[in-house]
Image: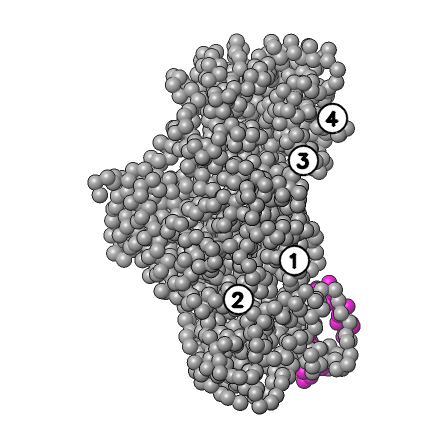
Amino acid sequence: MVIPETLEEIANIVRDAKGTVIFHARPQPHPFAISGPTGPDVVAISMSSYEGIIEHDVADQVVVVRAGTTLTQLQSHLAITGQCLPLPRFDANYELATATIHGPLIDKIAFNLPHGLQFQCGSWRDWIIGMKIVRADGTIVKCGSKAVKNVAGFDVQKLMIGARNTLGLVAEVTLKTYPIEALPLSEVQIVPTMAGRAPNFIQRVLPTDLNAAIRSLGQQLIACDRPSSTLWAEVRPMESPRRFNGDWIMRAGAGPRNLEFPDAALVKLMRRTKELFDPGYKLNPGAMGIF
Amino acid sequence: MLSSHAELAKALQSVLTPDAVLSGDAAERAYDCDAYTVDRNNPSAVVLPRSTEDVAKVVRWCNKNDVPFTARGAGTGLSGGVLPAMGGVVLSTKRMTKILEIDYDNRCLLAQAGIPNKRLSDAVKDRGLYFAPDPSSQSVSTIGGNIGENAGGPHTLKYGVTVQHILGLTMVDPLGEILHLGGKLPGAPGYDFVGIVVGSEGTMGIVTEAWVKLCPIPKAVATALISYRNVADACRTVAEIIAQGTIPAALEMMDHGILRAVRAAFGLEYPEGTLAMLLIECDGEPDRVAHEMESVQKVCKKNGALQIRLAEDEAERAKLWTARKKGIGAMGRIAPSIVTHDGVIPRSKLPEMLEFVYDVSWRYQIGVANLFHAGDGNLHPCFYFNDRDPEQVKSVVAAGEEIIRRCVELGGSVSGEHGIGIEKVDLMPLMFTPEDMEFQATAKRIFNDGSLCNPCKVLPSQKGCVEHRRRWRGTAW
Amino acid sequence: MDRRSGVIGYVDDRTGERLNFTLPLSTRIGPVMVETVSRVSAQNMNDILELTTHCIRCGFCLESCPTFVTTANEIESPRGRIYLVRSAVEGLLDWQKDVRPHIELCLGCRACETACPSGVEYGRILEGAKEKLEQDRPQFSKLALLNATTRPSTLKAQLAMGKLLPGKRIPTPISMLLSKQKPEVDQPTPQKLSPLPPLIHSQLKPVQGQVYLLEGCAMRVLFPRVHEATRRLLRRIGYEVLETAQGCCGAMHAHNGYIDTTKSVGRELLIAMSREIPVIVNSAGCGSTMKDYGNILEDTAGATKFAKRTFDASEFLFANGLMEELASASGLPVTATYHDACHLAHGQKITSQPRELIQAIPRLTYVPLQEADMCCGSAGVYNVLQPKMARSLVERKYANIEETGARIVATGNPGCHAWIAQAAQEHGKKISVLHTMELLEAAFCGLEPFMN
């Protein structure tokens, strides 16, 4: 495990790695991660030391932050000036029930899990206006800017969100912040009898299917966010809960079945994308399930 | 390559139907540019497909015959995004204007790419829903074009730009394959292809259908027009409103230059001595709107507002918005030529930037009017001049260059909503290093290795593209 | 700085100090420029060019244009046509080959002028272009058609002859000659005059003034009932029509590229209606041209004044007390809608007055019409010259009217009246078309006399 402290160090490690590179953002792997290969030629990087706020422009409500920074750290920094990222307020029950443990930003962005205010306030792709990325060959590139509205060039940062660092390592992000005063209350409901349980299954369905999905999950349901029709549940590893037209799921602890891509054309496009950005399949192998 | 335009048109007629192909001198002329008129180039033919399959057929034919192709909606773009830069075929989506499905319960709608933005809202307003992105051109500009440019508009401050309202896409990729990206539900695992295609200016393929998100029409709306003695007071108001945590639905500024035009064109009245105005709108639940408007008014008064006028009814509200949305157009009444820029800056830099704009205008002796999205820091300085005087044209070019450079220096961007297109393609290096641009080029290759699909746009120095012909920045309106 | 003149004020925000700097006259902001431009008459190429340069190609006109919405072809849009005309003036396109077909497909409805933020005077560009096209290559068949329709005696004779021909439509050979397409338009049939109950003068307002009423050319032959209704409504608000020998206003000629004819008949009309009293017009196309006499007859004394005293009948009645009179009318228990004649809505910007008047009819249920201000395809003699496009537009119009569920549709122009009535008849006579004047008069004396 290497723990680089500067962007250049990270870039050099990635560039010089002979085998594959795995990014570890936290002491233990993300609950929804798919474990990758191990062995002597695997370079594991921890981002825990590449942390801290680079710049916070209070008046513009824009913050530039290193990806190893934890969400707790960032939120408490922003709170001093009455700002935040529009995620539900700190609450241990909620965090456990929705798998949104306040880890480092790099994890949050890599997994892009649903949260309890996504319907009301959007999600990472709406808040991130710029990024610095370390490419598979060690080149450092940036996209976006510090302007809250910008259409110059292609929005490659959007492709990085939820990509589990398989296309490049997200090293720094520029985020829009939100006034705490305007923060709505989360409407996530936690099933009282399931308090203290962690989900291994996330399902988002169309609002018209929500009640049916709740019934179908039955006693396995942990939490539900009605506005975004998102459900968190604990299902037995071998069990396949009912699917609905147009829904999507994410699983934990089911190995490569953690992610399902039923559309062959989409898989082809994802492979092509991977090959363009990381021709040697060097970055986080296995993390997307299909490669 | 087919030898003549006539032959090419004939071949395309057999790919589609004869009435779906336009050719000849008049057609070539009418489709040689969009609302950015500085650069022009004739297409060899124009096709009017009726379906995704039609588009795919034409694209495959173009690939087989090595003919460049460019998609076009209403041609209201302000950066030359649909200019057929290398000639070839223009694919107009204007015969694809149907709404294919409305899912009221799940608040989304599937439409063909050529439908005007406004018609989406019109179709669902009886059920209390609307499509939130509202570029000023919304009565004509198509959803396909809005997706291509990731269009903005006055209400993006609260509701976000087009990409936040697009759920899924049907697209014909540059080789003619039909792709379905995204779906009715956002956030699905996998790479966010919808996110990269929206705003790619038609260079990654041709979007033919889209699932869009519908929002409930806000229960209450309050619109205020506030006059100020000077621009600095208005700027300070903007900064304070944002800083105190209020997010108005829209926060627009007009300076003295534009006010005169708007008064002449739409009879908008304001007190003597007004040199800047803000148009502020709050919407949502009635209580919250009243509360927000009250705190907005407090900030306005504190910063020396001359007059605060609240729209009494829907008709007055519509009038205020007409003045705003057609304001730049009204400049066309009073000057033979105008050029509008689209720089963005971090909004706290507004006072500094405006001062710079006036200084530039003074130094180059070119009149300037400002009407812009103050809440997002998206400036639209509009120079008015006479394009038949070469000296003035030269000054306008130089002045525009200075302004754009300054935007980037202040941490902003060369474009907030009009796009790069052909117009700002050689300004990209101001913001991005060659490595940054290579990274973007990689993203483009996900869909395309070749250079037939809307060539020469967004990224500079592409294979075979001619030098951007005239260095006249901005848009001629 | 010597070549610059004209001062623009600018206040320095730092110091609050007022600075002045100068710009060339041509770019001067303010009314000066507007005035110089609007005085230019589209009589020669330079003028047309000047008018076209005001188009900044924003495209806001596209969705307002019936031919663009129907064809999806930008050459058949206002922006496209302006660009073609400009290119032809600049010598880049051929007038007859490249421009003519597209100018001819234009309805001249001027909906684009309403949509245009830059104030481009499309109607004048169109008339200028048509004049140029006709001067270079006159179409004698079209001219004959214009003359036939605009000379009451000829029209009457033709109507009589028409009865001898088989079929309802205008004869195919004539249509082929004019449009190279099969005819869509029925031969015109004049309205039957049913007796109306006499006005009881003792119950009416005293006469307070006189007005002229334009009887027009085709209108007087085909729609005598509309004139009758207008006369009665005018009398109800206290105005008497001063009868005078008068002819055609020249609107059709102007819309088809024969400005010189418009000028000569216009001058005659000025003489026939020389007294300084209001001129009331119940044909939108005529009113629109007459209100533009100031431009068209710029060299004729009194033309501007004449234009200023010209009023559409609905405009005049609304402003002079018909709303009050309607309040005490017996009213009509019907559902009605209103179609905007292009030359009223776009040519004269009159949209609210006729609606307000109709809604003021007691017991009447008013329903709004979708795309009310989109052209029905009649457009003067357009439906004779461009039958296919006219047909597709009238079908669209009829479908919209049917959607409202109204039994009566009112409109303010004879062309729309006849054309929509034909469509209504073909679709089974479920809907009646009335001139706004007829509907308003029916509020006082019942629908019966206006329903055949």
**Quarter of the rendering occupied by the C terminus of chain B:** top left
For residue B366, side relative to residue C203 (left or right): left
Residue beneath disc 3 = C396
Tell me what residue is drawn at x 53 percent, y 75 percent.
Answer: A168
Whether marks 2 and 1 lie on the same chain = yes
Magenta-tinted stretch: A194-217
Amino acid type indicated by mark 4: Gln
Whether marks 4 and 3 lie on the same chain = yes
Whether marks 2 and 3 lie on the same chain = no
| Tag 3 and tag 1, C-beta contact below 8 Å | no
Which residue is more in the foreground, B280 or B358?
B358
- Residue B285: x %, y % from top left: 58, 59
Which residue is more in the foreground, C49 or C97?
C97
Label 1 marks a residue whose chain is B
- In this rendering, does residue C148 appear at all? yes
N-terminal label among 2 and 1: 1
Amino acid type indicated by mark 1: Glu
Which residue is more in the foreground, B286 or B319?
B319
Residue beneath disc 2 = B442
Question: Secondary structure beneath disc 4?
Answer: helix
Instruction: Please say if B415 is above or below B95.
Output: below
Crowd tier of the residue under label 1, counting other residues whose Cα lies within 10 Å: few below 14, some 14–19, many 20 or above? some
Cα separation, mark 4 vs mark 3, equals 15 Å
- Residue C424: x %, y % from top left: 72, 28
Residue beneath disc 4 = C425
Whether marks 3 and 1 lie on the same chain = no
Amino acid type indicated by mark 2: Thr
Instruction: Please say if B348 is above or below B252.
Output: below
The residue sitting at the left extreme is C2
